[in-house]
Structures are given as C-alpha cells and as structure tokens.
Image (cartoon, grey):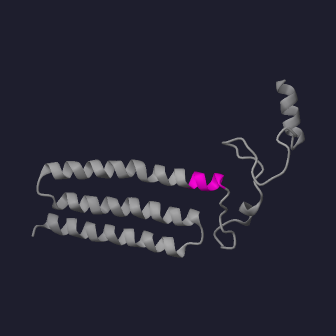
C-alpha cells in the first residue's frame, strides 16, 4: 500500500461522510430551502472527494480521465439543478419556515411582485395601479 492509496482511501471516506451529513440535513432542517442547501453543498463536496479519492487509487490514466469528466459534470449540473428546483419552489409559492431564528420574519410578508417573472403573487392589488408616487412620476416622465 502506497501513500497515494492511503490519501485516496481517506478522501473516499471523508467524501462519504460529507454525503451522510447531507442526508442527515434532509431529515433535520425545517423547510425545502434549508434542506436543498444542505444537500447541494454536501453532495457536491462529498461526491468530489469520493471521485478524487478514486482517481488517486486508479491504476490507469483512462480511469482518471473518466473520473475527471464525471467530476466536471457534477460541478456543472449539481448547483444548476438545485437552483432550478429552488426557483420552481419559490414560484410555486413554497414559503420558508419563519418560526426559526435564522430566517428573518420580514420574509413572511406577502409578495407584491416577482421582479423576474413580472407577475403578482399572494397579493390582490392591480398590476396597472401604481403603488407609490415615485413610480407614477417615473411612468409619466417616460411617456
């Protein structure tokens, strides 16, 4: 057993522990946003460490090349898919749990307008009606 095998085995074990911590986060955290953060961070890091450990223990360079390609794919798709899921949850009306100390109570306010999609959520105001005098003067100046 070489020192490369020892470092590779340690990396695999530490990566597996990070993945287990992410699984524990799914069970412990209160809402979908906290759970997704726990899993996305730990799975990217955990899978990365497992793949690095396997690459260190690999006997042939083609195996290392395949593991590097898998790692690059995980680095690109993992955070992008988590972002898409959380954006869909936000637009679907899923709220963060506000009883917990680390979530600001101001997040419990009803949404007036989604700045990205441009439509109203959780509010019955008219989108054509200006909400302040500054918007009215801006609209009149632009016309």
Chief secondary structure of the magenta span?
A: helix
Q: Is residue 68 left or right of residue 113?
A: left
Can you give x and y, in whole percent of width and height, for residue 80 in the image?
Answer: 47, 49
Q: Quadrant of the N terminus?
A: bottom left
Using residue 65 as the reference point, say whether residue 88 is left or right of it: right
Q: Residue furthest right?
A: 133
> Where is residue 44, by image quadrant?
bottom left
Q: Which residues are magenta?
A: 86-92
Q: Residue at x 35, y 72 (%)?
A: 17
Closer to us: 51 or 4: 51
Is 93 positioned to the left or the right of 79 in the image? right
User: x, y percentage for residue 37?
Assistant: 51, 62
Q: Residue 90, relative to residue 46: is it above or below?
A: above
Residue 36: in magenta span = no
- Residue at 42 percent across and 53 percent down: it is 78
- Quarter of the C terminus within the rendering: top right
- Give left or right: position of 33 versus 68: right
Q: Which quadrant of the view contains residue 135?
A: top right
What residue is drawn where x is 46% and y is 52%?
79
Of 54 and 95, nearer the camera is: 95
Percent position of residue 32, x then y: 57, 64
Q: Residue at x 38, y 69 (%)?
A: 18
């Amino acid at each position: 057993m070489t020192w490369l095998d020892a470092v590779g085995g340690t990396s695999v074990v530490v990566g597996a522990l990070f993945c287990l911590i992410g699984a524990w986060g799914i069970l412990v955290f209160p809402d979908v946003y906290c759970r997704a953060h726990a899993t996305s961070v730990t799975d990217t890091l955990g899978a990365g460490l497992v793949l690095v450990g396997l690459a260190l223990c690999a006997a042939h360079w083609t195996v290392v090349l395949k593991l590097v390609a898998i790692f690059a794919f995980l680095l690109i798709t993992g955070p992008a898919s988590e972002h898409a899921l959380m954006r869909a949850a936000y637009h679907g009306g899923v709220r963060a749990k506000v009883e917990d100390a680390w979530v600001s109570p101001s997040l419990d306010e009803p949404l007036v307008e989604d700045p990205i999609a441009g439509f109203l959520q959780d509010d019955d105001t008219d989108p054509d009606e200006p909400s302040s005098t500054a918007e009215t003067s801006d609209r009149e100046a632009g016309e």
